[in-house]
Amino acid sequence: MSIDVFIGLGSNLEQPDTQIERALQAMGKIKDSNLIKVSSLYSSKPMGPQDQPDYMNAVALLSTTLAAEALLDQLQHIEHAFGRVRKDQRWGARVLDLDILLYGQHVINTERLTVPHYGMKQREFVIYPLVEIMPELQLPDGTAALELQQNLNKNGLFVVKQLHI
């Protein structure tokens, strides 16, 4: 049985818009999965240290029969192939960041994976693209994504261009 999974994509190094578009192509090749929909590409201010370039962000909807951690393995493989090096520094500059935001209506707390993604409710660069592709979405705790968006400051977030799968 397929599960709808929302994946957050982010990049602020080495032509971020190209990185996101290439990552979408790679995600479209994940076994036992289908890329269903993608938001526009957004520009956002970096979290944490401000001495780094602005980010490009998007959210994709993927339908998969993979278990959550098996999907995480596939996403981390894509990140690694794009040159992502995991560091201790949180919120630093990166070529590519792929995060499982929601895995159906499941709540997952393991050593490797927390779903829903921690902090997503406060991140305009997650909520705005999420609402763009599924305005009626309800999080596992019953919170409406649209309600989160209405109470969230854009912090300079803007659409750069439409993406296609």
Image: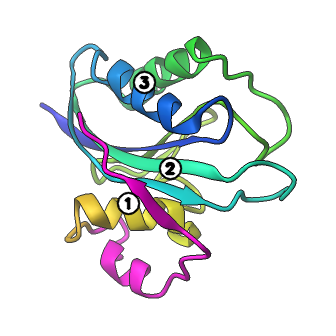
Nearest the eye: 4 or 69: 4
159 is higher (above) or lower (below) than 70: below
Q: Are marks 2 and 1 in contact (CB under 8 Å)?
A: yes
Nearest the eye: 3 or 56: 56
Q: Residues within 10 Å of mark 1 (few under 14, many from 20)?
A: many
Residue in view at x 57 percent, y 22 percent: 79
Query: Which numbered mark, 3 or 1, is in the foreground of this view?
Result: 3
The stretch drawn in magenta includes residue 91? no
Image quadrant where one finds the C terminus: top left
Q: Residues within 10 Å of mark 2 (few under 14, many from 20)?
A: many
| 18 sits to left or right of 155 | left
Q: Secondary structure at mark 3?
A: helix
Magenta stretch in the rendered image: 138-165
The stretch drawn in magenta includes residue 158? yes
Residue in view at x 74 percent, y 48 percent: 53
| 60 sits to left or right of 84 | left
Residue in view at x 33 percent, y 22 percent: 25
Amino acid type shown at disc 2: Asn
Task: Give the residue at mark 2.
Answer: 57
Marks 2 and 3, Cα distance to the nearest angstrom?
Answer: 13 Å
Q: Position of residue 30 (x, y in %)?
A: 31, 17
Q: Is residue 102 visible?
A: no
Looking at the image, is mark 2 or mark 1 earlier in the sequence?
Answer: 2
Task: Give the residue at mark 3.
Answer: 22
Q: Secondary structure at mark 2?
A: strand
Amino acid type shown at disc 1: Pro
Looking at the image, is mark 2 or mark 3 earlier in the sequence?
Answer: 3
